[in-house]
Image (cartoon, helix red, strand yellow):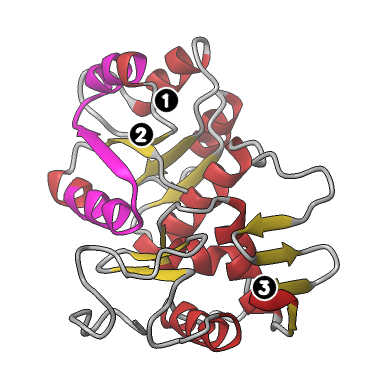
Amino acid sequence: MSAHILVAEDDERQARVLRMYLRSEGHDATVVHDGRAAIETARWLRPDLLVLDVMMPRVDGLDVCRILRRESDVPVLMLTARSDEEDLLLGLDLGADDFMTKPYSPRELMARIRTLLRRASPPAPGPEDGVLRVGPLTVDPLRHEVTGPGNRQVECTRGELAVLTAMAAEPGRVFTRRQLLDRTDSWDTTVSERTVDMYVMNLRKKLEPDPRHPRYLITVYGIGYKLAPGSGREEAGLGPGRGGAGFGPR
């Protein structure tokens, strides 16, 4: 899911790295460098999530969390260079949703951000019978059934079904590979974003009349994929077979 995330971090280098990672996952990121700016920006921006450093000038992160929690239920992930358990407990008592100690792994931080965003977002309303329909494609995730063009029954693996279900629930939305990979809930830490390319390639073989010229599973170059009811051409002004080197299957 795409979100607007406010980063309150006084270390400008760490803030730049955080913004880079957030943008690579399709999020908008606004960065401030002191606690007072964090309070003021959160009030007018109304972000989807706040990444909040504890040690900041003017107003520290604990006070920022205390003040904002009286006004908003925005998810708060706090960062601290101190491993003092008392700080951690105080932050959670003030309403922080999660806590990470520096130095941290950016990939782990992104994983925690994705978890907080999922918790904060209500599930998208779907059809009453749970069946998703996009053009001639029908996806029934509860029965693990997929029907392709011509009413053909299509066998899908668990990962393929998870990716297809995510796109069918929001047809036309562009998903990054990371967003689609999250939907697979894979326990295997060796799985990478290129796994999504493999799922899409296999789904095209099973669903597309001509997998080389996809009509439904469309590549949006440099970003990821979307599911369309049948457009016949790929995005970004490129027809089938042109460009796209380095971005997975066309």
Check disc 2 and give the amino acid type: Val
Residue 220 rendering spot, x and y as whole percentages:
32, 65
Image point (24%, 35%), residue name: 30
User: What residue is pinned by disc 3?
Assistant: 161
Check disc 3 and report its element: helix, strand or loop: helix
Q: Residues within 10 Å of mark 3 (few under 14, many from 20)?
A: many
Q: Position of residue 143 (x, y in %)?
A: 85, 68
Residue 188 lies in the magenta-colored region: no
**Splitting the image into 4 quarters, where does residue 139 fall?**
bottom right
Q: Which residue is mark 1?
A: 62
Look at the numbered discs 2 and 3 and tell me whether their residues touch, using CB distance below 8 Å: no
Residue that label 2 marks? 54
Q: Answer few, some or many: residues within 10 Å of disc 1's Cα (few below 14, many 20 plus, some between 14 and 19).
A: many
Q: Residue at x 42, y 77 (%)?
A: 214
Left or right of 146, for residue 33? left
Question: Mainly helix, strand or loop, the magenta region?
Answer: helix
- Amino acid type, label 3: Leu
Q: Earlier in the sequence, mark 1 or mark 2?
A: 2
In-image side of 141 versus 196 (left or right): right
Q: Quadrant of residue 128?
A: top right
Q: Residues within 10 Å of mark 2 (few under 14, many from 20)?
A: many
Looking at the figure, which quarter contains the C terminus?
bottom left
Give the residues drawn in magenta, as a range. 16-43
Mark 2, secondary structure of its residue: loop
